[in-house]
Amino acid sequence: MIGAKNQPRAGGDFLPKCPTGIPGLDDVTGGGLPMGRPTLVCGGPGCGKTLLAAEFLVRGATRYDEPGVFMAFEETAAELAANVRSLGFDLNDLIARKKLAVDYVYVERSEIDETGEYDLEGLFVRLGHAIDSLGAKRVVLDTLEVLFSGLSNAAVLRAELRRLFRWFKDRRVTVVITGERGDGSLTRYGLEEYVSDCVIALDHRVTEQVSTRRLRVVKYRGSAHGTNEFPFLISGDGITVVPITSAGMDHPASTERVSTGVAAVDGMLGGKGYLRGTSVLVSGTAGTGKTSLAGHFAAAACARGEKCLYFSFEEAQSQLVRNLRSIGLDLEPWLSTGRLRVHSTRPTRYGLEMHLATMYQEVTDFAPQVVVIDPISNFIAAGTTTEAGAMLVRLVDFLKERGVTSLFTNLTHAGSAAEETDTGISSIIDTWLLLRDTERNGERGGVLYVLKSRGMAHSKQVREFRLTDGGIELGKAVPSAVRAEPRSEGGGP
């Protein structure tokens, strides 16, 4: 994860940067956009360019006391205000308080003569007046294509683009200029990215009817920057960029222990439970008790006074509460006190990157000490095995970076190898509990054993595992002659 402590240096000094106030974007850019310089935000239709630009101004006005000017060539002030109201932005209020000015400029292509009469002087006068009147520190130009729609001569276009960007630099305002993606190129004219100090590309792609938005910093003069693509969300609170990569390996390693919620399972883990801040995997076929173990872990966290965020991808909150109540576990009090939050959704509702972005936002907002994801095997329905594995690795790194103890459940299928997962994340898991069905003396039963637990001594026994009205019980160690049996889909909590 890119954090403030990893801010890139330029020539041994920090490059002055202007924080955008957009969650995640300042992490990705190492502090914000280049202060007093133009940034080009480019992408195809509907990828969020105008929203990002508008939020840059709104956050600047409301959080950093930096008034802004929005010069629009496609939308009137009224249309723009209506479009961003869904994000909770009240442009009219900011305009009334002289924190923001919105100037709509109608450009008629047929009136533009590129034979030498076309120039930007009129635009500079208009922009200069707006900036001076407001004492603006931030400016948005939306979009570049409309402004230069009448120019086809590359030499004239390049000269005017350079003049425009230089004018902004001389005024020492931080600028976001939006631009359309070209046909097979980053920008429409293929010139804009060369004269820009910073280029951010937005992308909105649809794969197998599932849409995902991604952001990439293509160029950042004077500053190091990552080249990865980062998913981002557009929600009722604005834009959230997920600054997560799988490179985060500098998280602290705690020696504190947290209970599993089942005393007997704690006993198999040195009598103290899981190491705090580590990742736990509980795998097994359907109905073996994965969700029951997850529920006990969530309840134990709440009983300690901690907050638990439970992502359920198979059961609604009410169904989860009802089913766990059947084994004597009542989550309702923790939901009422707010220590437990259940987020239920179908895996196929979003793409994998959007799931990652949603979980990042939920974890950031709720700040839990414990996170449960039940189950991870369903993510394969939203992408390929490789994609699901890569997403989960980034999620594990993110949770460890925040010191969150995470528990993942994984459904294994009858006939498949028990000691592997479809998503291939077993190697990054710290503690792995395996549940298996057994058949003995004409009765079905279950067993539990600790496949691995890094950093601690743990039991090597295979113990009987039972779900009762009073919760989870572990019996004696079972003999090796007991054989594991495949089990059909369905089952209890």
Image: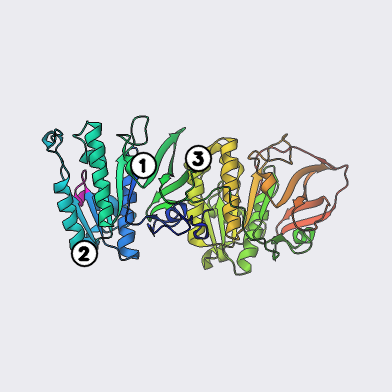
Residue beneath the point at 19% across and 53% down: 127
Q: Which circle marks residue 47 in the picture?
A: 1
Q: Does residue 477 appear left or right of residue 117 in this picture?
A: right
Residue 253 in the image: x percent, y percent? 67, 60
Q: What residue is pinned by disc 2?
A: 98
Q: Is residue 130 visible?
A: yes
Asked if the stretch drawn in magenta spans residue 202, the answer is no
Q: Could you tell me the amino acid type at mark 3?
A: Thr
Q: Mark 3 or mark 1: which comes first in sequence?
A: 1
**Per the image, is 75 magenta?**
yes
- Residue segment shown in magenta: 72-79
Distance from Cα at disc 3 to Cα at disc 2 = 45 Å
Q: Which label sits in the foreground, 3 or 1?
A: 1
Residue indicated by mark 3: 348
- How packed is label 3: few (under 14 Cα within 10 Å), some, or many (20 or more)? some
- Earlier-in-chain disc, 3 versus 2: 2
Query: Residue drawn at (65%, 41%), measured in percent from left and top?
Result: 490
Which callout, 2 or 1, points at the residue further toward the start of the chain?
1
At label 2, the amino acid type is: Lys
